[in-house]
Image: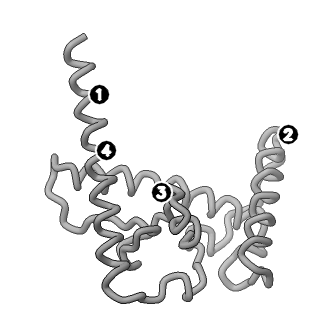
Amino acid sequence: MQELHRNNEHVWLLGNSGYPQRPWLMTPIPDAAEETPAYKYTAIHGKTRVAIENTFGRLKNRWRCLCKDRTLHYGPEKCAKIITAFSVLHNLALKFNVPEPEPAELQNMPLSFSDHLFQENGGDDLIRGRAMRNILVDRINRLHTKLYFLINNV
């Protein structure tokens, strides 16, 4: 993700408030006041993370090698290909009504990323990350304002 960001790709990881804000890692805004752009951003961030975490939980339930106590012993690119293949197979299983296994104890545990992805790089990444998040907050606010205007003036 860091490399994609350096190449001006507009993609981000979504992390919870336990992760440091980075230009390539968006986190919620703590204590955002209701009805503010920051609150809207944090609400959208949270809804998106819930959908992603539920998807991870379903994939880990069907393919137990993705669970916390088991490890894919491959580099990030190969792991991404494996997870993509599991996703395709999962969608096929849904299409052909193959039932999911009984839920595992670890189903709702979030995937853990390698610690090296989240090492502190000094204050610059934190500052750039907050600036990038502020841009996203502004874009979300402008979109909501336009939609509100269109709905109420039709």
Q: At label 1, which amino acid type do we have?
A: Leu
- Which badge, 4 or 1, comes first in the chain's sequence? 4
> Residue 142, how many percent across, how many down?
26, 39
As drawn, 43 above or below 141: below
Circle 1: element type: helix
C-alpha span from label 3 to label 1: 24 Å
Q: Nearer the viewer, residue 103 or 58?
A: 58
Q: Nearer the viewer, residue 117 or 113?
A: 117
Proximity of marks 4 and 1: CB atoms separated by less than 8 Å: no
* Label 2 sits on residue: 96
Q: At label 4, which amino acid type do we have?
A: Ile
C-alpha span from label 2 to label 4: 38 Å
> Residue 19, how many percent across, how many down?
41, 78
| Relative to 31, 4 lies left or right | right
C-alpha span from label 4 to label 1: 11 Å
* Label 4 sits on residue: 140
**Classed neighbour count for the residue bearing mark 4: other residues with Cα under 10 Å, few (<14), some (14–19), many (≥20):** some
